[in-house]
Amino acid sequence: MNDKSNSSGSFCRRTRREFLWETGCGFGGTALAALLSADGFFSRPQQAVAAPSAAYHNPLAAREGHFAPKAKSVIFLFMYGGPSHIDTFDYKPGMIGQDGKTITVKTHGRGGHKNEGRIVEPRWKFQQHGECGKWVSTLFPHLSGCVDDIAFMHSMTAESPIHGSAMLMMNSGKLQSGSPAMGSWLNYGLGSVNENLPGYVVMLDPTGGPISGAKNWASGYMPATYAGTVIRPEGSPINDLSLPAETTRPMRREVLDTLAHLNQQHHATRTDQSDLASRIATYELAFRMQQHAPEAVDLNQETQSTRDLYGLDDDKTRNFGTRCLLARRLVERGVRFIQVYSGGAHNDDNWDAHGDLVANHEKHAGATDRPIAALLKDLKQRGLLDETLVIWGGEFGRQPTAEYDVGTGRDHNSYGFTMWMAGGGIKGGMSVGSTDEIGSAAVDDPMHVKRLHATVLQQMGLDPNRLSYFYRGLDQKLVGVEHVEPIHQIIA
Amino acid sequence: MTLLRKLLISANLLLAISILSWLGTCVVQARETDKHVDFATQVKPLLARRCFACHGPETGEGGLHLDNPQTALAELDSGLHAIVPGDPESSELLTRVSSTDEFMRMPPEGEPLKPEEIDTLKRWIEQGAEWKKHWAFIPPKPQTPPQVKQTKWVKNPIDAFILADLEAAELSPAPAADKRTLARRAYFNLIGLPPTNEELDEFVADNRPDAWPRLIDRLLDSEHYGEQWARHWLDVVRYAETNSFERDGPKPNAWKYRDYVIRSFNEDKPYDQFVKEQLAGDELDEVTQDSVIATGYYRLGIWDDEPADPMQALADEKDDLVSTTGQAFLGLTLGCARCHDHKVDPIPQRDYFGFVSFFADVTSYGTRGDENSNSQWTIESEETRKQRQEYNAEIGKIEREKISMEEVGIKRMSAVDQRRSETPERQELLDDKLEKFLNDSEWKLFRDTLDRLNEVRRKRDELPAAEAVLALARCEPQPEPTRLAVRGNPHVLDEVVEPHFPQLFNIPTPSIPTAKEEAHSAGRRRILADWIASPDNMLTARVIVNRVWQHHFGRGIVRSSNNFGELGDPPTHPELLDWLALWLIEHDWHLKPLHRLIMTSNAYQMSSAGNDEALAIDPMNDLFWRFDMRRLSAEELRDATLVTTGKFNPQAYGPSFYPQMSAEVLATQSQPGQGWGESSLEEQSRRSIYIHVKRSLILPQLAAFDFPDVDSTCEARFVTTQPQQALTMLNGSFFNEQAQYFAERVRATSSKKPQDQVATALRLTLGREATQDEIRSGVNLMNRLRKMHSQKPEEALRYWCLTVLNLNEYVYLD
């Protein structure tokens, strides 16, 4: 971005250092040229700034990863609040008939550490589906038709059963805030192929954001360029994107032309200052974003059958369906990382079923089942599923036992839970890892959240143990300092 | 050939091309071939970055540890020698790094060393492979300003240091900037606000020889100086007013710490005292209200009120303190030694826990049920305290008089009533019967006494209530011994580690007195603070002068101003850094004289204009051949706009305010609007440093312009250029509202002629007269908006004003 990175341009120095430190990653030709020029290597005065647009070195310029990617985009369907694994995809036939029985089991949730509890038998029947014969509960009548495209990880573990820190761990790999989210890492490592849209998009539930809000898609110690951008299906899709009410696009054009003229004159006597040229170019980029972002979220361009497929015809599924359909449109436009939240705010506005498990999960599964199935089918029929990694899961699962003396509510469980992935070079019809016979903890091949992160980076063409960012005297990584293996069993 | 390999080769090719095209630099390198290689700045960082992962202090593959001479020069497992001083041919290290065989070449991963890096190693070995200590771990030595040829250019010793390097590179310093540019530079630099047109004109017209130092002094005396420079410090100490995590709850009274920092800068508090107050303000010989507030430093970090693993969370809180303190005050990344010995710097894990041990008495921020006891300290001013004592004494005295009068009456009562007077019914009894048992004059005296009592009580109650501040309200005077956590895991504890200074300082372990039973704190932090704030500490003064330099010139002499270790950037002007550090200590750690010294140098007053020759030789301006142009910070941009439009509210100090946030932004919260208040429009026109800093809800306008992440210390802000900034400045409500105010101001101060309005807007924004072309452009825009887009003249002017606020010349400082 700025040639003259000496003026507090630690960003640029860091970029180059990054480059110098780890060029083993084999950046390809164009990408390398972009990085070099972004960093002042080509900052010859005689080359300076013919056309402003050529002078803008987008820090999000696409670059190649460490190796050929299997996936180009990620859609993370975040089931905020923590869906119960034993009521959804982790079939526990041994629990049938055990309802109400008090057993010895170690749990840790919002209510603290406990050593025994009253079993709440899974409240939905399970049936086998697909060629793989996967057991899925009746909460997902549509999604159960897609199991042959899905790899289930039944032995996920996380470090915290408390929403705030668990959300941060799922999003950034750390229990504490201040580190970049996975989407930031991908944009840092790969850039974005569409400069008219953000490279990292977040779509929230209409009830509100998740706990800790923007911390969940922050770029932490990286520049804000890599932070997630909230996109809204209604109103101004991006903050400050829409023109003020009284301004028309032709009027804006007049302002931009005048501004460009004056800025060019100012720049003419400072041709070596490429920041100035960059800034001139960003006004044109912003102008194009104003055109492209609304087009990207304009669902009127979709056929009625597609809209119906995603459940836009049903009040129950319209909200989440809209966001899933938007996610597909953003993937088509090259957005690198898209996170869609199911559930927001607090209590039963999300999957956090402390009180009435049945009502809570019927509601949220009911709102998401058809749209998610539609998303997988739609991506597949358009040939996009192979290059789009879809992730499903919450920040943790739920306990096999009841939280209170009466009722079906379950407390949080980070000792073992289920997530799944589909597309993007992931094997379908797979199930790996397992929890014990009541789903209280992962027993077979426990998989820390970091392994999920490693898998995502790997599929996107980045070596999780090499993608690093120098900060605080350390090479920081999404997966942390210790070596972390991707989940190889599910990689095709 | 693997794909990776192919890519690497294409990368090499491109790199080679870029190096070839980088002619100027090659000239510099050619000139350097016979120059002495400096181990500390040229060789060690290279070894650290490219070799230590496998051949460092922790791992020594093939028997090779390159971190110290004893092992590096020893015979390897293979029988060869990695380094043979004076004999590059026999040095296996060189053979391996320059090998073209991919299986032979070191390092095995990543890009091969660059030719000039290999050359550096070769020359170093030729010259005897001398091992020297890292520059920062040698105490600063007194420096004599070097001799230079162009002695006329030297205003003060700073110029001599700068010029000597420029002359060695055959470069000349840029000419002086013009007075308007200088004035704008000084205003933004010292007070973060633009000069008014009148102030500019006055300075330009001031032909006295000391006009410039006078201007500097005037700005240093301004209350706004503290606001501007406090902000730099707040970045370093990760200042925020909430705790992050699930609830991101407020830190009550955090703003008093912010005000303390502003006040400290405005009072030109010696930096050593500033350090001591923040680290041990509760343990100083004289504990003042300010020094207590200063310990709010310990309470600024993130805090998990509902940790999944409380022991881990507590260790994380301590880690935040060690990491922040190490970087902020010492420029050391001590935090890297939490889990293992520092990979590069000589900081063993024991030293990390020695530091933790100094903080052993620091309690956690709070508990979920009680966020106040540990962190809210109730204090009052000395005067109020004395007054309260006096009133209390007087109240006691009058109460005794009152009781003795009551006794007179009681003695005249029946035995039953006398007995009642010794029970809780006494007051009831007196209310009923006392008047009957006293004569008129006695009763009157009694009533008067009551009045006197009530009067004094009223006065006491009207005293300012004792005030709560964010501070180390509760400490552990007899803390548990600190134990080394194996691999940083607080659940696996090893040996006890006593408080001690990092070994690289080579200072004897301090003796730690045992605190008395009733003591407030353990007394360890005072020892740490005294050591950090000592003139003998080899890093403290260097680190702060470097920060001051950074905020004058846009980058530190050491660019990585939080990291003076071996992975940090070496100083571009090491002698100057040492000279400045010692100068500061000689001047009793006062920063205002340092600003004056720096700003009166010719180096500071150079133009930012480029020249081809210098750009070719030193494109990064490592040598300071010109002044670096810079973009205004997020706060400067907002504050300058308020000043320009005439809406600025200069009210200093006090609780933070809440700028209006759109519903869409608030909707990102799990409880939209929670923790965000409402402030009057007038309040909202105050300076940005007074904006409430909520960790999970940073004002988008500030975030777009690189307001730092507030969860950990920030040494230097990013300067990004991205489309969201254009959206903020053209579509965002703040700039549109301000453009409206600006248009009103322009209409009020200029004639109705469009060309006058255009020129006035430019003059108010840029501090200079408009050119004919600019006036034509503005008038043309307004005409087109009126004629082709049916805008009223006021509206057309508003669009012009918005345009002007978006000019590069407004956003960037020369």
Image (cartoon, coloured by chain):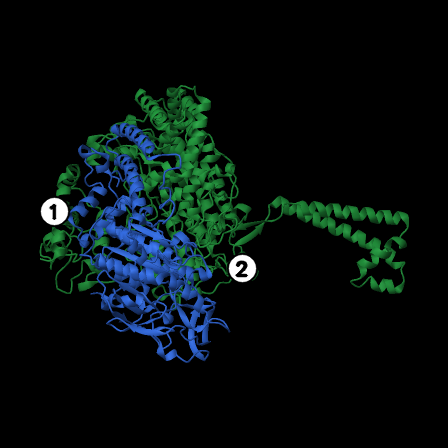
Left or right position of B425 against B769: right
- Residue at image position (45%, 35%) is B225
Disc 1 crowd rating (10 Å Cα; few below 14, some 14-19, many 20+) is few
Name the residue that disc number 1 marks.
B13
The hue in which chain A appears in the rendered picture of the protein: blue
Closer to us: B750 or B58: B750
Image height check: is A122 above or below B658? below
Q: Amino acid at mark 1?
A: Leu
Closer to us: B150 or A486: A486
In this rendering, does residue A443 appear at all?
A: no
Left or right position of B520 against B449: left
Left or right position of B24 against B281: left
**Image coords of residue B600 (percent x, y):** 37, 30
Name the residue that disc number 2 marks.
B370
Residue A258 image-quadrant placement: top left
**Image coords of residue A319 (percent x, y):** 38, 55
Q: The C terminus of chain B appears in which quarter of the rendering?
A: top left
**Image coords of residue B565 (percent x, y):** 31, 50
